Amino acid sequence: MPDLEKVAANNTPPGGSPGRFFQRFTREQRYLHGVLFSTFLGLAGTGLPLRFSESIWARGLARGVGGFGAILFFHKLCAVVLTIAFLIHLKEIFTRGILHGEKGIFWGSTSMVANWKDVKDLVGHLRWFVGLGPKPEFERYAYWEKFDYWAVFWGMIVIGFSGYAMWFAPFFAHFLPGWALNAVLVIHSEEGLLAILFIFSIHFVNTHLRPDSFPMDMVVFTGVESEEEFKHKRPLEYERLAREGKLESRLGEAPQTWQVNFSKVIGFTAIFIGLTLLVLTLSAYFI
């Protein structure tokens, strides 16, 4: 067992007092998330001009990058990169859950699969919002985090398949009727727009702009969080790890100043781009 006093001394947040930090995400998970949000921003930033090609801002963007053909090229490039990242994640799940039989992948307190507690937490949260009950306490993943996670699967199946069906229409025409190929255009456009509106409003608010995390939740960038954050946001996980004697195995190093600053630049840039695209989307409808 590590010397906890020495670990605490080494885990001093920049400009702060000594304290312990705990790992929440691995380096591989953070890199994969970085690819995910980067390619999603790319898909949104290229898909919206194609969707609202008659808008002034869309035509201006097209002129700036060499035309709508160039925008479509980058849209397809982002789609391919995101697909590869998604397949890598599926391989990891299959390897850990099926081949290695790792517990907690498909069920339990550490799983991303929804369970009865998530239903109770949702109801309890709604009651807490209106002052009818206490705030629910969460385990490793809250119900909205699981919803966001599975939304990616839905998007890859519905938006991804419809996108590839349009891209490789001659191939899909061999086993899809003509009306289906027309339908995928509508499905891809509307489901993509729904995903953009959800991510740039609901997801941004839940993850970064709620009081517990405002103005940004840094853990998805640094991979670690302070013990105070851990206890406050996920008390049931903290208590379970303490009860099982596994807290020390999750100890991590405090993020360095450059890591925090770099994460802020990346995070705030992504939020700014997302909110800008949200405003442009709404303006295309109402202006």
Image: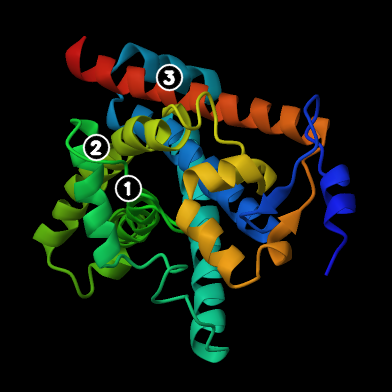
Q: Residues within 10 Å of mark 1 (few under 14, many from 20)?
A: some
Which amino acid type is shown beneath numbered disc 1?
Answer: Pro
In the image: residue 126, left or right of residue 215: left
**Residue nearest the observer in this picture, 14 or 270:** 14
Residue that carries the numbered disc 3 in the rendered image: 276
CB within 8 Å, label 1 to label 2: yes
- At x 42%, y 33%, the residue is 204
Task: Identify the element where label 3 is drawn.
Answer: helix
Please give left or right for residue 48 compared with residue 27 in the image: left
Image coordinates for residue 229, horizontal then vertical, percent: 58, 41
User: Visible in this render: residue 240?
Assistant: yes
- What residue appears at the point 65 percent right and 69 percent down from the top-left corner? 246
- Mark 2 lies on a secondary structure that is helix
- The amino acid beneath tag 2 is Trp
Q: Position of residue 4 (x, y in %)?
A: 83, 56
Residue at which label 2 appears? 128
> Spatial distance from mark 1 to mark 2, Cα to Cα?
8 Å
Question: Does 65 sit above or below residue 246?
Answer: above
| Residue 136 tag number | 1
Q: At 50% across and 54% down in the image, what residue appears?
A: 82
Quadrant in which the C terminus is drawn: top left
Q: Residues within 10 Å of mark 2 (few under 14, many from 20)?
A: some
Residue farthest to the top, as pictured: 287
- Residue 145 x %, y %: 39, 51
**Nearer the viewer's eye, disc 3 or disc 1?**
1
